[in-house]
Image (cartoon, helix red, strand yellow):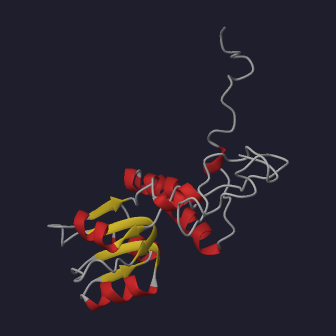
Amino acid sequence: MGIDLKAGGRRTGHKSSSKTIKTNDPYRRLLIKLYKFLERRTESAFCATVVKRLHMSKVNAPPMGLYRLSKYMKNKSDKTAVIVGKVTDDVRMLECPKLSVCALKFTETARKRILAAGGECLTFDQLALRAPKGSNTVLLRGPKSREAQSHFGHNTSVLNPHTHDGVKPFVRSKGRKFERARGRRRNCGFKV
């Protein structure tokens, strides 16, 4: 069975996310405009990647902890780390090295630690003035498969027991006495 080429094939709407800006955040909307302009005028792959990542949803722009950031930036003290997402603090790391980081957001403690170490926290508009083509930068991403994601989705119910089968509940402990009543036994309402 072939593809109906007259109808334009079957893949519809797979590029629509980058044509219209879905976010209502005015700062992010302006950043998309800015980096789209830079991508067009400089033809830089860095700006194209940043635009693509600015369009991404929150799940696809995971946060990055300070420890992972410092690990990637080892022996790259002259470069700026660029994360299209949030930078979070890592309490397991005792000493924070001097880092130059550009991100959409920083947690309060992460920003404090980076500045205390003599580093700097940049915004994307500051980075556009400093390195419009992304020279001397390292483009990084947070881990996509993280524990928090296993809790994302809808809860199951009597009406639809299979809305999201793989959603992990927030349970104090996993054992005989925990969350084993309604919804987990046939004789107590329903079983999933």
- Residue 138 on image: x %, y %: 29, 61
- Residue 162 on image: x %, y %: 73, 43
Q: Which quadrant holds the N terminus?
A: top right
Q: Can the viewer see residue 65? A: yes
**Figure label count:** 0
Above/below status of 55 relative to 79: above
Left or right of 140, for residue 108: right
Residue shown at 25%/63% (left/top)? 72
Of residues 73 and 31, the one drawn nearer to the viewer in this rendering: 73
Q: Quadrant of residue 176?
A: bottom right
- Residue 163 on image: x %, y %: 73, 46
Above/below status of 18 relative to 33: above
Left or right of 191, for residue 59: left
Q: Quadrant of residue 113?
A: bottom left
Q: Can the viewer see residue 56? A: no
Q: Quadrant of residue 133?
A: bottom left
Above/below status of 43 relative to 102: above
Of residues 37 and 163, the one drawn nearer to the viewer in this rendering: 163
Farthest top residue? 1
Farthest right residue? 159
Above/below status of 56 relative to 105: above
- Residue 164 on image: x %, y %: 68, 47
Residue shown at 24%/83% (left/top)? 94
Of residues 90 and 9, the one drawn nearer to the viewer in this rendering: 90
Residue shown at 60%/50% (left/top)? 18
